[in-house]
Image: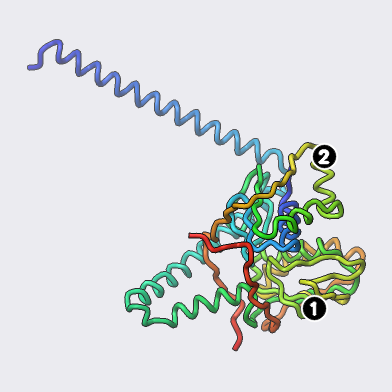
């Protein structure tokens, strides 16, 4: 089973590897994005429920992104679980990917811009 | 008076209609029973605490969406008005841009929230998990040891230290979050419960917390704007 923390870890790793835009199952990851469990599914952006298989799309320098996910020190727990339980973790480079726009809007109720 | 064949035809038609309605009702009943069984099966595989947490999360998400819906309707009205006046109402557009910049961490912000102080070493995934839980609780702006954080900010462990977007930070770690203090407190308690078994952690609610650090807009090299 894929946990919400797994998606969170992959997304964090991709940001650290230089990703410029990311989506998970066509849901855009934005500055306020969070992942949480919703039963056997994953709640993303506090609104949309995702279910497997999970496809994470990242735009950025393909070699940098790939070396991030290939690094044996990264995602080691997920990779190990994938080997044991056959989660089907895989990745591939592409020269033409699309990441959809955020389909909601940002609302600030507490953080007031200063100045 | 109708002829006998016409009456037979009418009766046959009525019979067909009644049969179709009965079939449809039967189908709907089966769908309903199957859906209920599926939901029950999904819920049965989870313990009571998980189900309670799930219901709580969904209720909260629902409330937030309703609130967001009202705000968005107001904003839509303001933008429509701006459009109708030929863009004369630039104030509404400017306000929208300000929100975008604040969300992207490009503007200093202040507001109610809380401050989490961690006195010992933590790992990157622990901080990321805490941030994720705080965001899920509606956190709107964050900083760690003075460095502004959005979801795209890389946080990596380097031994006992942390790297926040390439900057080394060390204990004590002070994580600031702006949002509803009550909701944030619950998320913080969830995140720090395991941390507290090995390091000293304090969580303090603030009525007005200032996050003054900002992020520079990042130029896009690979991601091109699509249509």
Whether label 2 touches label 1, CB < 8 Å:
no
Depth order, front residue of A27/B53: A27
Tell me residue B122's x, y (percent).
87, 67
Q: Is residue B216 above or below residue B197?
A: below
Q: Where residue A78 appears, x then y in whole percent?
A: 80, 48
The image position of residue B107, as x and y in percent, is 62, 81
Q: Is residue B174 visible?
A: yes
Residue B196 in which image quadrant: bottom right
Q: Residue at x 85, y 71 (%)?
A: B201
Numbered disc 1: secondary structure = loop
Nearer to us in this view, B51 or A104 = A104
Q: Which mark is residue A83?
A: 2
Task: Judge from the rendering whether residue A107 lies leftward or rightward of residue B139; answer left or right.
Answer: left
Rounded to the nearest angstrom, the CA distance separating label 2 from label 1 is: 38 Å
Q: Residue furthest bottom?
A: A115
Q: Residue at x 35, y 26 (%)?
A: B21
Residue A57 is tagged as none
């Amino acid at each position: 089973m894929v946990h919400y923390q797994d998606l969170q870890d992959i997304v964090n790793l991709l940001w650290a590897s230089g990703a410029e835009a990311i989506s998970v199952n066509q849901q855009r990851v934005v500055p306020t994005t969070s992942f949480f469990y919703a039963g056997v599914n994953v709640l993303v952006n506090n609104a949309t429920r995702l279910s497997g298989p999970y496809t994470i799309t990242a735009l950025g320098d393909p070699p940098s992104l790939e070396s991030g996910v290939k690094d044996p020190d990264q995602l080691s727990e997920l990779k190990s679980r994938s080997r044991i339980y056959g989660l089907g973790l895989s990745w591939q480079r592409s020269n033409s990917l699309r990441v959809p726009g955020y389909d909601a809007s940002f609302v600030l109720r507490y953080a007031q811009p200063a100045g | 008076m109708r002829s006998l064949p016409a009456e037979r035809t009418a009766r046959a038609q009525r019979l067909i209609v009644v049969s179709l309605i009965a079939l449809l009702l039967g189908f709907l009943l089966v769908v309903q029973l199957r859906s209920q069984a599926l939901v029950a099966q999904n819920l049965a595989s989870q313990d009571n605490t998980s189900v309670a947490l799930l219901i709580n999360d969904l209720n909260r998400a629902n409330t937030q969406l309703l609130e967001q819906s009202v705000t968005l309707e107001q904003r839509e009205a303001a933008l429509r008005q701006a459009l109708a006046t030929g863009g004369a109402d630039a104030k509404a557009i400017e306000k929208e841009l300000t929100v975008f910049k604040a969300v992207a961490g490009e503007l200093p912000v202040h507001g109610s929230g809380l401050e989490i102080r961690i006195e010992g070493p933590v790992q990157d995934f622990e901080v990321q998990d805490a941030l994720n839980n705080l965001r899920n609780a509606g956190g709107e702006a964050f900083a760690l040891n003075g460095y502004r954080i959005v979801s795209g900010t890389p946080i990596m462990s380097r031994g006992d230290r942390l790297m926040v977007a390439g900057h080394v930070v060390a204990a004590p770690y002070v994580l600031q979050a702006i949002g509803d203090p009550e909701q944030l407190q619950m998320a913080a308690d969830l995140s720090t419960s395991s941390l507290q078994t090995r390091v000293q952690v304090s969580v303090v609610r603030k009525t007005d917390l200032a996050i003054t650090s900002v992020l520079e807009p990042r130029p896009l090299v690979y991601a091109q704007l699509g249509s």
